Amino acid sequence: MIAFALAAMLATAPMDPTLAPGSQSTPSSPAADQSPVQLDDIEVTGRTLDSLIRSFVNEVAAPNDNRGLARWEDRICVGVANLRLEPAQYIVDRVSTVAEDIGLQPGRPGCAPNVIIVATDDPARLAADLARDQQRALRPGGSGMDRGGAALRRFVASEEPVRWWQVSMPVDSETGERATRIPGECRNSCGSALDYAPIIFVDSPSRLNTQIVDNIFRTVIILDVDQVSQISAQQLADYVAMVTLAQIDPEADTSRYASILNVFDAPDTTAGLTDWDKAYLEGLYDAERSRRNLRSGRNEIARSIHRAHSRLRTQAAD
């Protein structure tokens, strides 16, 4: 029944990132130094803030192969299945609040969810069922849209309390149109090769910059109800928000940083999103993502995170 409900949610989730959901829904069933590094304690590590930020980005960021870091473009709609109404609504509200804080627009009740969260006492079976029965939803087939078959197998085999899978789309930042072809789709009479490939009009050709960016348009999250019970509702909701709003590497080692991503290893270290996490999300969503070179693109985001960190410190001082 859980797999069937999740399949139904996947079927209604928008494939096209330009088709933004209009509302929000909650289904009725619903190394040397081991201490984390705080943003305002960088002198403890003997490293500059820039160096710490770049290391954090390189550790946690998990873009699709040969693509830049993706993010949501406009609206998200969160759906939770197989939880009681109260905890489900709390997760929906908290993820939506974090999304709104970084400039996204949460949907209203009744929208088709593009963030799908399901709780189960048998996550391995559910993940395997999805990978087998909903492969097209998890791997649409377009170039640069997912992390590949090996990553999907790791998703299925994971024994972590929370596992997630995201699908993104290369798009034209000027128009929002797709910049990759999805197998089986074509335009017009499908009689020419041009009918099968997206056409991108480039206003200012450049070897350094690009107008093609990557946008997340679907996130699937599976919660192991037995394992997530060890943390609070806020900790769980903030963890889910972090892995929903950014492409986070499930195998990242963040033990050197004060991050919500450490919550299952050290539940007492943080009550929710930390300054590291907030700066990362704010920096990701403020960055222009205009660099063609992938390394330069990460550096651009790292600089944006540095600016976000400076804003957070200024706000704290006030």
Image (spheres, rainbow, N blue to C red):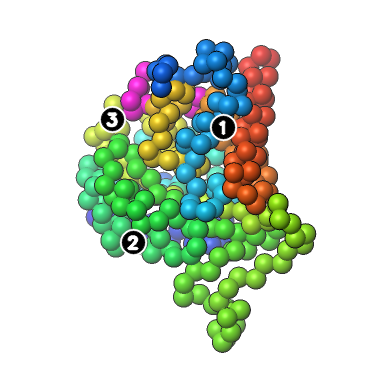
Q: Which residues are magenta?
A: 263-274
Q: Is 46 on the left or on the right of 126, as rendered?
A: right
Q: Which sits earlier in the primary sequence, circle 2 or circle 1?
A: 1
Front disc: 2 or 1: 1
- Mark 2 vs 1: CB contact within 8 A: no
Q: Quadrant of residue 43?
A: top right
Q: Tell me the residue that label 1 is attached to.
A: 54
Q: Are marks 3 and 1 in contact (CB under 8 Å)?
A: no
Q: Amino acid at mark 1?
A: Arg
Is 189 situated above or below 171?
below
| Residue found at x 30% / y 36% | 161
Query: Mark 3 or mark 2, which is nearer the start of the sequence?
Result: 2
The residue labelled by disc 3 is: 229
Q: CA distance from mark 2 to mark 3?
A: 28 Å
Of the residues tagged 2 and 3, which is closer to the observer? 2
Residue carrying label 2:
134
